[in-house]
Image: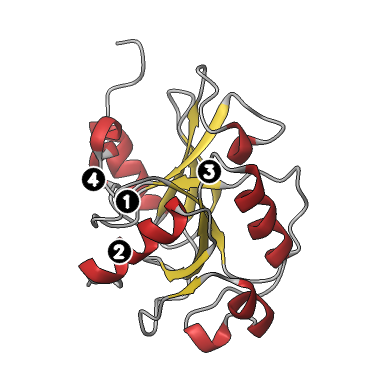
């Protein structure tokens, strides 16, 4: 799949987030909202734009593999991985479950920083495949709005990888067969 952000847009996303702003941007699956995962004011603004309950966790999105590896070829791609988080990193994203981190690496791009990410819709509303499907109130309240054209429109597959037997929590963009194939090539933790 073609990356929905060019390098200039990726750098603009990183700059907006670094400045404490909230951005609407094209991810690999649906349009998303992004902010600095360590700034309470930015996280509160993102949650307010969505109408999202403050106790509901969000994923942290990275744009490089770095320490994460590729999880059997699933990263980068249309998955959200639920990882053990014993260091309690990114507590604003983890909310009431600080020892679980939702991780996304949708594609590689020069954003330069991780972002707290959620879909660009009202809580419980339909996912946006095109920028014009993002609610006008969210676009108007964002500090940056990036158009990446039409996206597939299927949210990420959420996979709990904290136990040796991975569990699909939400079926989405990546098939169960692809998840099971990836699991076979990843060594279980502790081995």
Q: Position of residue 150 (x, y in %)?
A: 39, 84
Q: CA distance from mark 4 to mark 3?
A: 26 Å
User: Residue 37, labelled with which disc?
Assistant: 3
Of labels 4 and 2, earlier in sequence is 2
Please give the residue where the numbered disc 2 appears in the rendered image.
10
SS at mark 1? helix
Furthest-top residue in view? Answer: 190
Q: Label 1 vs label 3: CA separation?
A: 29 Å
> Spatial distance from mark 1 to mark 4, Cα to Cα?
9 Å
Is disc 4 in contact with disc 3, using a CB cutoff of under 8 Å?
A: no
Q: Secondary structure at mark 4?
A: helix
Label 2 secondary element:
helix
Counting residues from the N terminus, which is met first, the one under dot 1 or under dot 4? 4
Q: CA distance from mark 4 to mark 2?
A: 23 Å
Residue holding disc 1: 178
Figure coloring: secondary structure
Q: CA distance from mark 2 to mark 1?
A: 28 Å
Mark in the foreground, 4 or 3: 3
Q: Residues within 10 Å of mark 1 (few under 14, many from 20)?
A: few
Quarter holding the N terminus is bottom left
In the rendered image, the residue lying farthest to the bottom is: 132
> Number of callouts in the render?
4
Q: In front of the other: label 4 or label 2?
A: 2
Question: Vertical placement of 45 versus 9: above or below?
Answer: above
């Amino acid at each position: 799949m073609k990356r929905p952000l060019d390098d200039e847009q990726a750098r603009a996303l990183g700059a907006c987030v670094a400045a404490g702003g909230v951005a609407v941007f094209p991810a690999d699956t649906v349009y998303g909202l992004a902010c600095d995962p360590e700034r309470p004011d930015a996280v509160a603004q993102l949650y307010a734009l969505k109408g999202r309950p403050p106790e509901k966790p969000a994923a942290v999105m990275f744009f490089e593999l770095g320490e994460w590896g590729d999880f059997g070829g699933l990263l980068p791609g249309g998955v959200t991985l639920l990882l053990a988080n014993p260091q309690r990193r990114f507590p604003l994203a983890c909310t009431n479950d600080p020892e679980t981190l939702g991780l996304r690496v949708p594609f590689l791009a020069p954003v330069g920083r991780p972002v707290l990410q959620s879909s660009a819709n009202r809580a419980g509303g339909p996912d946006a495949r095109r920028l014009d499907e993002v609610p006008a109130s969210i676009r108007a309240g964002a500090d940056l709005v990036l158009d990446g054209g039409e996206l597939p429109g299927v949210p990420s597959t959420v996979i709990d990888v904290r136990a040796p037997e991975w569990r699909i929590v939400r079926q989405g963009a990546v098939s169960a067969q692809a998840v099971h194939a990836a699991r076979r090539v990843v060594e279980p933790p502790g081995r």
